[in-house]
Image (cartoon, helix red, strand yellow):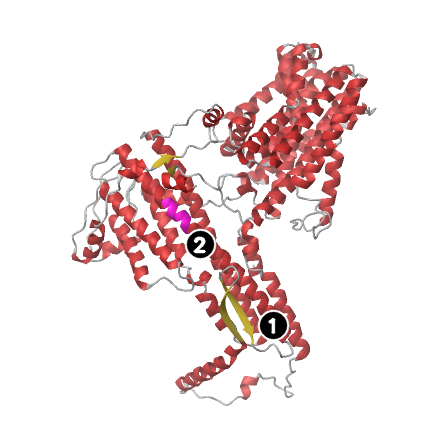
Amino acid sequence: MKFEKELKSQMVPEWQEAYIDYVVLKNLLKDIHHSIKKTDPPPQPHYPSGLTRTLSHYRAFSGLTTVQRSLSMRSTTSSHHEDIENHHIVVNNVKGIDGLDGYVTTYLRAGEDDGVQELLFFNRLDVEFNKVNKFYKFKVEEVMKQADELDRQMNALIAFRIKVDNPKHAWFETAVDIDNLASSTKALSTSISSPGKRPSKRMAEHMDKIDEDRSLRGTRTEETEEPEETEDSKELSSGDHPPPPKEVKHSSRQVVPEVLMSNNKNTTTNSMLITGRPPSLEILNRVTINKPADTPLPTIKNVFNVPVETDMKFTTENLSKVEEQLKKAFAEFYHKLRHLKSYSFLNILAFSKIMKKYDKITCRNASKSYLKMVDNSYVGSSDEVIPKLLDRVEATFIKHFANGDRKKGLNTLRPRVKKEKHKVTASLGFFAGCTVALIFALILAVRTRKIVEKDGHEQYMETLFPLYSFFGFIVLHMLFYAGNIYFWKKYKINYQFIFGFKAGTELGYREVLLLSFGLSVLALASIHANLDMEIDPKTNDYKQLTELLPLLLVILIFVIMLCPFNIIYRSSRYFFLTCAIHTFFALLYKVVLSDFFVADQLTSQVQSFRSIEFYICYYSSGDYKLRQHGCNNNTAYNVFTYILAPLPFWWRMLQCVRRFFEEKDAIQGWNSLKYFAIVVSFVTRTAYGRNNSTEWYIIAWVTSVVAGIVATYWDIVFDWGLLNRKSTNPWLRDKLIVPYKSVYYAAIALNVLLRFSWIQMVLDLEVPFLHEQSMIAVIAILEIVRRGVWNFFRLENEHLNNVGKYRAFKSVPLPFNYEDDEEDD
């Protein structure tokens, strides 16, 4: 794989603009190469006729015993050559307008024939390097502030543990941990405070001494497991040092006193350990437990002005909650450090490769002086800071949150790479083939048996068709979602981060296709069973059972969704159910993107909600054995028709209302009015369908047109970020992920067309070859298609917003609030 593709594949998607623009620099080198070819074509060597020999065959023989002499001569020549070549460029460190260090390269041979292209190359090279250097410095300072905050959180956690567990002699070990973590953070902060300088030898030894202290103290393991043999323990067992003492079995939170080793070689370490101070429990007097307002109880208390309890209760339950929050904070912080380490490595490697390409093209040796500057810069000289901090985070997490189990701790910290399973692909192919076969079999059955021409056709379309179309709507929506995942991955849209999926649990497009085709096979098999049992006289007595097949299938789906066992992608099922619950109780939960994205999907499944209402009515009040129902004459059914159809839009409106009051964002207020207009249009269209009067006809037209125009404008301008008159791309946006502009214009036209598909219902247009229920299903399918297209561009716009703000990591709430921080706020 070429480095250009490797660099692109390993980029943090939201930081892609902060990386070196390798393609532009490579193109500038191509221009230099073409310019050199034009101005100075390479001479064609003339070889004598006969045997062809290389030029080295005609040089003087240097002898076999003059290796040292030739090496010395070569070193003298190379040093002299280096002194000359170093005058091609001079790199200076200057202060920018913003007060940050910047580097400017002066090209000393700009007056030569090919000097203009090389001058442009070095100017752009400086721009790219200063961009990388400043971004890296900003991010390192950011993570050091976060590390300091995590230090404070850990101090409060340890004091909280001591208060809950109250272990005897526990102060010693925790004191050492606090001193070590604080000293290591202080050392790291000192090392990055001086850009262009590597950590001093004394500071490095101090860091290594802390590592040695940790290794000498040993790690805790679970009661049923043997202690893992580390590299440090291997060295101790092979040397003169005695092995560390065995620890007493203890719980995951209990802190156990340690025995100091009395070996003379460890006197320095022992003296350092003895200076540890016990953690002061007075910390707990200055902190409060952070109780987020994203749960129902704090929200209700806030509405009724009920004071929230700030007193800390030292219970095991609260301690578990605090530990769980800090686990997530450490995991996200560790994830950020790994990305920052990769960012530094990839960019330094890119500058090295691009300068070597320059030397190769121009036959010069300018890379040595430039890369020396890179090595002395901030991004080059602080390469030891992040690895050291990574080690500290690993050691702290393993000790305090994994009970000393290194494997368990690292599995939690490091994101798991999801592997494609062959059985998923094989099962997908099987169910897809079955779906196609069942569809063809259904078409042939309808044609050969002439079911459409029979007397029971009208009755079938009024009863069973709405029941089975429910599964068709769900399957179609899942197919479009699978397509969205495929194209999100293709165009590097980080949908996993945007939705907040746990690493390694998100479904790929193959898994979603497998679920959708599996559901379609069950639904189609149910339809075939229904038709066959009804026609065959032998199975006509089982008519009651055949009429219950759709209901049994719905019950099976709900049972699978709620199944507590780890089968059929439990984490994804529970993630969807969590978002659905947050949507149903929109005002009681803080709204995040995954919640309102699910709510938007539900707004395109209005007909599915009507099908659920029909399920309840048909199997509760109607005589399903005879395929008869009186739902249209049922007052409760007609009333709930007005409620259930616009219910997803009510949920979405309530989400916007909550965000408006929480975030004080006027856009959310206008968005809630948009959904209110859609609710009104749904109610008026339903009323017109029931009453069919001129007054309702006019009202339905006016409300539907207003809602359609507002919703279409909102989709294209706010959700997609398009229709920008000042954009470099006419009427689109400045940044486009899809390389074809026609795709965006087609999506705009399709969205406008499908947004007004309701016109058919208002105008009462009839298609001769389609039943009324079939026409309703077609309109519902068109809305699902519109939503599937909307999903891709909505997430693309969100991804570009994250890219513009370099937002690549989740903001994890911390469990403790310090009083001094609240006063500063």
Q: Which residue is mark 1?
A: 118
Image: 483 above or below 42: above
Crowding near the residue tagged with mark 1, few <14, some 14–19, many ≥20 C-alpha atoms within 10 Å: many
Residue 149 lies in magenta, yes or no?
A: yes
SS at circle 1: helix
Picture residue at 46% right of the left edge, 44% below the top: 416
SS at circle 2: helix
Residue 24, horizontal then vertical, whole percent: 61, 62
Residue 750, horizontal then vertical, whole percent: 74, 38
Instruction: Say whether residue 770 is visible.
Output: no
Q: What's the residue type where badge 1 is placed? A: Glu
Instruction: Say whether residue 202 is visible.
Output: yes
Q: Quadrant of residue 755?
A: top right
Q: Quadrant of residue 537?
A: top right
Residue 391, horizontal then vertical, whole percent: 36, 51
**Residue 593 left/right relative to 220:** right
Of the pair 405 and 496, the residue shown nearer to us: 496
